[in-house]
Image (tube, rainbow, N blue to C red):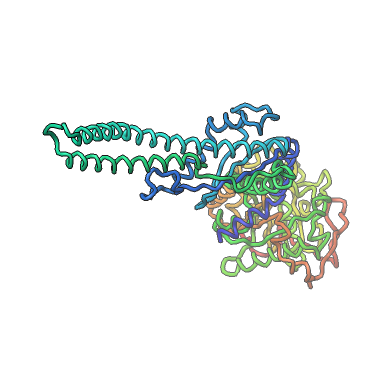
Amino acid sequence: MEVRKYLEILRRRIWFLVQAVVVVAAVAGGVSGLRDPVYQATARILLQPDNPAEQLNPGQPVFRDPNRFMQAQIDIAESEAVARQAAESEILKNLAVDADEVDRKVSASAPQDSDVLRIIGADRTAAGARDLANAVAASYIENRRRSAVAGLERASADLEAKLTPLRDQLAELDGKIRAASAPTASGGESIDALRAARDATAVQYETLYARQQELAVNISLQRGGAEIIADADTPNEPSSPKPVRDAALGALVGLLVGAGLVMLKEQLDDRIRSVAGVEEALGVPILAELPFDPESAENPGQVAAIARPQGLLSEAVRSLRTSIQYLGVDQPVKVLVVTSAVPGEGKSIVAANLAAAYAQAGHRTLLVGADLRRPRLNDLFQVRPGIPGLVDALAPRRPEAGPDGISIDRLLIRPVRNLAFVHSGPTPPNPAELLGTRRMGELLDQLSAGADVVIIDTPPLLPVTDAAVIAARADGVILVLAMNESRRQEVQRAKAVIDGTPTRLLGAVVNKATRTSVPYYYAGYAQDTPVAGPAKMNGNGSAPRPNGARFPSRKATRKPAR
C-alpha cells in the first residue's frame, strides 16, 4: 500500500519531476560544456616489496602489511620531494612547471590487492598530461632507488666499522706470531694459542667482508624495487568535461531531488488528493465521484443534468442519487442539505444537478437556495430580477400579501418537469439569524409538504454558521469536497460542525475528480427515464406546467415532514 501511495504521488506530480530532471540535466550539461578540456594520462609501475636486493639479510623474509605498504607508496609518489624532482627533470623542461603545480596535477592510486601503482597526470594538453605522468613515475622510481641505496650504504658503513678493528687485531696477532717464532724469542704466549686466535679473527673478518662485498654488488644493481611496466601514452580525447555523461548524471540527481521535493511538498500540503484521503480524513462513505465538467465551467448558466443528460457528469450525479436512496431505506431522507467546507468546492452545482436528477427520475423535487451570501443557483437557473425569493418570504414587506406573507406559488420557479426552485432573494444583513427564525422552519414545512425530496443549498460551513442552522432542520447532510483543492483540516473542521448538529452526515461527494478516478462505464449507459428539457419561463419566472401538471402548494393535504 505504501509503495502504491508513493507511486500515486509521483504520478500526480509527474510534470514537476520532468521539469526537475530537464532543468538539472540542462544546467549540468551546460556548465560541463563551458569548462576547459582536461586530458589524463596514466603510467603504471610494478612494485616488488619483497625484492631480496632491498634486504640487508636476504635469508630472513620481511613480512609487510600489503595495504599499508601500498598506501605508503602512494604517499611517497604524491610527496613534495618527488614533485620537486619531477619538476626539475628533463621531461618537464618544456612545460615550465613548479613543484606545487606538479603536485596539483598528478595523483597516484592502486587497485585493490595489486602491486601496480598508477601515476595519473592531468593537464589541459594531451602532451602535458603524458609528460607529467612519466616524469613523476621516473622521479618516484629514482626516489625509491636512492632510498634503497642509502639503506644499503648505511649497512655497508656499519660493516666497515666492524671490519676496521678486526684488521687491526689481525695485524697485531700476526706481529705476535712472528715474534714468537723468532729463535731469540723468550718465553711468552704460546704460538699455537696465537695462531688459533688469529684464525678465529680471520674467519669473522672474512664473513663480514664477504657481506660487505655483497652489499656493494647490490648497490650497483639497485633499482628501488620498482619498474615502469607501461609509460603514459598521449591521450586521444579529454577525460573531462563530458557533457553527455554530466547531463545524464544531472538528470539522475534531478530525479532524486525532484522526488524528494515532491515528498516534502506532499507532507506540507494537506490538500486531499485521493478518495482514500477523503475516507481517512472524514471516516464517512464516499457517495459519488463527480468528474470535472469543462462545459459547465465554460457555460455557468447551464445545469449539466438538464443540458447534457447523457454526459459523464450527469451519469455520475445519477449514481449519487442512487446512493442517497439506498441510505434512506431505514431512515427516510426527504430534506437534504448540500454544503461544503469552504467556498469554491462546487456545492451549488452539485445541489442543482442532484435536484435535476431526482426530477428526471419522476420525484417531485424542491430545490431551495439558502445560500444568502453568494447565491450561485441564481446564475445557474438565470433568475430574473423582481421574482420573490426566500428572503422575501422570511421578511415580507408587502401588506397585500396577507398575514402569511408571499404565497408559495409565487416563490416557485419551475425549470423542468417535477422540479421547483426557490431562489435566495436579496442579500440580507443577517443571514444566519434569518435562517434560524421560527418563520424559516414554518416556511420549510410548507414547501416540503408537497415534495418528495427537498434539496437545500447552503453557504459553506466555514467560517459562517448558516449551514449548521439549516442542517438542524434536515434529515441529512452531504458534504461536497473538491479533489486536489479541499484541505484535510478544513473538511475535518466542517465535519465537526455537522457532528454538533442533530442531523447525520450521510457522506461525502468528491467533486472535480480526475478522469482517471471516475469509472468510464458511467458514460456508456443512457438513462431510461424520459428527460424534460429546459422550459421557457412565464412572466413570474416559472415554467408552464406540462399537461396541466402542477407542483403542490402549501394547501396540499399531505402532512408536513417537519
> At x 75% / y 65%, what residue is drawn?
315
- Image coords of residue 397 (percent x, y): 73, 40
* The C terminus: image quadrant: bottom right
Q: Is residue 496 above or below residue 288?
A: above
* Frontmost residue, 427 versus 338: 338
State which quadrant residue 358 falls in. Answer: bottom right
In the image as oriented, which residue stretches furthest toward the bottom? Answer: 528
**555 sits left or right of 148 in the view:** right
- Image coords of residue 422 (percent x, y): 74, 52
- Image coords of residue 307 (percent x, y): 83, 59
**464 sits left or right of 413 in the view:** left
Answer yes or no: is residue 405 visible. Answer: no
> At x 40% / y 34%, what residue is drawn?
154
- Image coords of residue 249 (percent x, y): 67, 47
* Frontmost residue, 458 versus 172: 172
> At x 54% / y 58%, what residue is drawn?
283
